[in-house]
Image (cartoon, grey):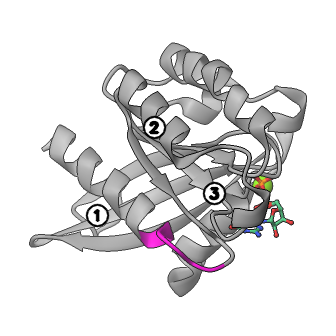
Amino acid sequence: MDEDCDYLFKAVLIGDSAVGKSNLLYRFAKDEFFLDSKPTIGVEFAYRSIKVGDKIIKAQIWDTAGQERFRAITSSYYRGALGALLVYDITRKSTFESLKKWLKELREFGGPEMVVVLVGNKSDLLHSREVNLEDGRSLATLEQVSFMETSAKENLNVEEAFLHMIHRIYETTS
Ligand code: GDP
Ligand code: MG
């Protein structure tokens, strides 16, 4: 572990192709952007350090390199992850309908304590909305996960979604 932090957490981004996972990560990590590549397993990740109380938490956030398109995310992607942002696109209903499959995979490969935040991205595209705010909220309640709508484009709620996940991981592990 690095000497400049008290905790190092791994979290993953999941959801259908083109929902905005990579753009959400670019937004969140842009202040301190080290995008490492692991071409052999088809993932990339970025780090960001945040302060919670007097502790410094370094979050290592993994992003897919597009392999979700082939439904080929492997268990190694999830291994050791304490949190997940599960992302859909509010303008494409099919990405919302895929969430059941993603939740099943999360529960299969992720640990039982994994913190999941459901994210409805592209909230700037209100005129093309296909998934109501209420539908996202209901699913989150049913699945007992947190929920937020975001816009990576307009930088709305992006910081909040990641920080919420990181704070909850900290609460569940300390
Ligand atoms: P990924 O496949 O889930 O990683 O999705 P990307 O981050 O590559 O984004 C897919 C497409 O959606 C790109 O054309 C992005 O510019 C666009 N996009 C991502 N987030 C938003 C958003 O919040 N609003 C809008 N309008 N477009 C977005
Ligand atoms: Mg991507």
From the viewer's perspective, tell me whether residue 143 is left or right of residue 126. left
Q: Considering the image in quadrants, where does the N terminus appear?
A: bottom left
Whether tag 3 and tag 2 are in contact, CB under 8 A, the answer is no
Queried on whether the Cβ of the residue with tag 3 lies below 8 angstroms from ligand 1, the answer reads yes
CA–CA distance in space, label 1 to label 2: 15 Å
Q: Earlier in the sequence, mark 1 or mark 2?
A: 1
- The residue lying at 48 percent from left, 57 percent from top is 60
The amino acid on which the numbered mark 3 sits, given as a three-letter code, is Asn
Secondary element under disc 2, as helix, strand or loop, is loop
Circle 2 packing at 10 Å, graded few (<14), some (14-19), many (20+), is many
Dividing the picture into quadrants, the one containing residue 52 is: bottom left
Query: What percent of the width, then of the height, locates residue 163?
Result: 35, 63
Dividing the picture into quadrants, the one containing residue 44 is: bottom right
* Nearer the observer, 17 or 122: 122
Q: Which residue is mark 3?
A: 121
Q: Main secondary structure of the magenta part?
A: loop
- The residue lying at 48 percent from left, 24 percent from top is 110
* Nearer the observer, 151 or 103: 151
Q: Is residue 134 magenta?
A: no
Q: Earlier in the sequence, mark 3 or mark 1?
A: 1
What span is colored magenta in the figure?
Answer: 154-159
**Can see residue 21?**
yes
Circle 1 packing at 10 Å, graded few (<14), some (14-19), many (20+), is many
Query: What percent of the width, then of the height, locates residue 157?
Result: 47, 69
Mark closer to the observer (3, 2): 3
Q: Which residue is mark 1?
A: 57
Q: Quadrant of ligand 1?
A: bottom right
